[in-house]
Amino acid sequence: MATFLPAQDKKGRTIVYDTSEKMYRVINYIMKEGKTKPHLIGGTLLNNPQNAYEEMMLTKKFYRKTNGRMVMHYYQSFSPGEVTPQKAKEMADQMVKHKQFEGFQVVYATHIDRKHIHTHFIVNTVNMIDGHKWQLPSLKILQDYSDELCREHGLSVINRDKSKVHKSQAQKKAELKGKGWKMETQLSVDEALKIATNRADFISIMSKQGYQVKWFDGSKYVTFTNRNNQKVRNKLFDSPEQYTKEAMIKKFKENSKEQNRKYKDKGNFSDIRKTTFFDVRDALEIATGKNEFISILNAQGYQVTWDDRHKYVTFKKDGHQAVRNRNFYPGEKYTKEAMLKKFALNMKKEEEIKSGKYRDVAADTGEQRRGDLLYLLTSILRLSNPNDNYPHQTNQRNHSAEAIRDYMAEAEKGKGIDWEQS
């Protein structure tokens, strides 16, 4: 049988890789000599798995998404003596074909330095094909697929209702008292309170962990509901005085101050503002209404606050400073009124396209030029193996490493490539 889990620290907390340095170290770790062998290393959408860090960073820079969570780290572990290293690698080759990994660069390595053979998977959080960020899937989906592969290979499958997973001492003690799921909820709240900067931020983070949160102004308590529809109020947590509404709001303010200080110190605010600008600009080019515009940005991890009572629109990503449309240039192009007019124009254009009246779709939307540039990106990854079939590959287009580097150099100067210019 095999277990499939996200990498965790000694306290049972999922490890977060939120800097390029952490990303570099974990990729080097899984391919470390003595832990694995060259023939037990693989990758998807990578020209050379040994260069996974450089190739993944190239994708991030191309889409201007070099902040936030850099990679995801999972592992698939087998019981001692259950599989050979080659069999584990073969199952890893199949694991990365799951639709959840489609378009994402993955480097993986089967480790043989322990009694239990196991494979580490490092996933780039930026999709190489369209640039969207990794959306955290239900772990059960990946575990079920791992179980399916075990059956195909004649291995036993875990009874997940009775299986033992990595748990902290607090969780184990709670289960002995018959309230394990309540402690699970409290631990999830603790994780959200480490980074949330406001109530909406907190509710969003809890939602990603599988919880519904009812936090109403007229109610004294906050209610959390897990995936099994089990409910618990904050007053039932251990040390409930730390989880009152007032205590949590105080924690939000502390987190906000700390993030503001960190981004000012590191100069990262301008980076997130630039990233947000490009994502908003691209969504504005295709959205035909406010709801569609918000939906597109939600899919990229943004919380969008468009309140008709307020003058500005706010865009917020977990762990980052909020950005308002007043920060964009030229400002008159990104007012609420200007964006609503743009939605109307997009709707009119879409209707013309459907009716066959619109003749210059590719040139106007810039899709062809986007495709050309994405092709240049993938060309670098094809140089040593020109037979690889990457997206947008044609025999007519010229390509070279120098070309993409020239484009990136121009973008770094602030000029941007042609389809970025208004």
Image (cartoon, helix red, strand yellow):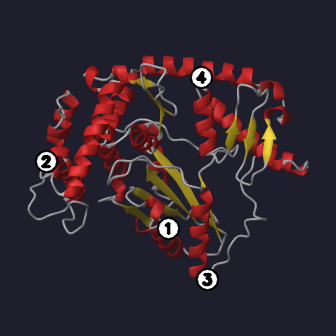
**Any mark on residue 363, and which?**
2
Closer-to-camera residue (32/63): 63
Residue under numbered circle 4: 255
Give the CA separation, mark 1 to mark 2.
Answer: 39 Å
Q: Mark 1 or mark 2, which has the lower sequence index? A: 1
The amino acid pointed to by label 4 is Asn
Image quarter where the C terminus lies is top left
The amino acid pointed to by label 1 is Met
The reply to whether dot 1 and dot 4 touch (C-beta < 8 Å) is no
Disc 3 element: loop
Q: Mark 2 or mark 3, which has the lower sequence index? A: 3
Residue under numbered circle 1: 95
- Farthest right residue in view: 177
Give the CA separation, mark 2 to mark 3.
Answer: 54 Å
Q: Is residue 229 visible?
A: yes
The amino acid pointed to by label 2 is Ala
> Number of labelled discs?
4
Image quarter where the N terminus lies is bottom right
> Residue at 21% of width from left, 60% of height from top?
392
Horizontal and vertical percent position of residue 67: 41, 35
> Residue at 67% of width from left, 22% of height from top?
249
Q: Is residue 169 visible?
A: no
Q: Is residue 306 above or below residue 374?
A: above
Q: Mark 4 or mark 2, which has the lower sequence index? A: 4
Q: Mark 4 or mark 3, which has the lower sequence index? A: 3
